[in-house]
């Protein structure tokens, strides 16, 4: 009985950790997409889209928002991991668990 509790705790931690990693990966995709889009605009017309800021200032802004995106991705992954663990393994309420198997 105690072995099952330990296995479940380990499984829960691994599950949430993998969701945290997924959140990190998703923020990388979001970050890359936003960055490619805005740099293309700035390369076309820096005066219009650069907001009067230099490339050095944009580099500082990039570093700050990169950090915020990383934290946001990790937070999002953690929250989703907790939510889906509860829904799938505790409540057993996921859509795929309600199907009848012949």
Image (spheres, helix red, strand yellow):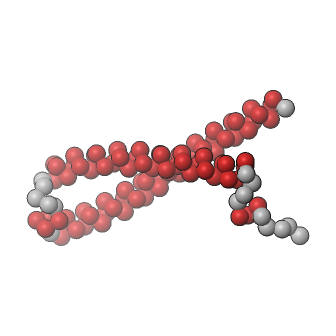
Residue extending furthest top?
2
> Residue 71 at what x, y percent from top left?
41, 44
Going by the image, does 39 lie left or right of 45? right
> Residue 94 at what x, y percent from top left?
70, 59
Quarter of image, res 36: bottom left
Identify which residue is drawn at 14% across, 64% down. 46
Q: Is residue 24 visible?
A: no
Residue 27 position (above or below residue 40): above
Which quarter of the rendering shows the N terminus? top right
> Residue 47 at what x, y percent from top left?
10, 65
Going by the image, does 16 lie left or right of 59? right
Identify which residue is drawn at 37% across, 63% down. 33
Identify which residue is drawn at 37% across, 56% down. 31
Q: Is residue 6 visible?
A: yes
- Give the mark count: 0
Residue extending furthest right?
102
Going by the image, does 42 lie left or right of 96? left
Identify which residue is drawn at 16% across, 49% down. 57
Quarter of image, res 102: bottom right
């Amino acid at each position: 009985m105690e072995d099952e509790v330990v296995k479940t705790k380990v499984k829960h931690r691994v599950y949430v950790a993998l969701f945290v990693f997924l959140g990190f990966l998703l923020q990388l995709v979001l970050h890359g997409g936003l960055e490619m889009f805005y740099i293309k605009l700035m390369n076309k017309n820096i005066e219009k889209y650069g907001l009067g800021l230099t490339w050095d200032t944009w580099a500082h802004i990039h570093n700050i928002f990169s950090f915020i995106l990383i934290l946001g991705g990790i937070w999002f992954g953690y929250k989703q991991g907790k939510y889906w663990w509860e829904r799938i393994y505790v409540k057993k309420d996921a859509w795929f668990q309600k199907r009848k198997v012949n």
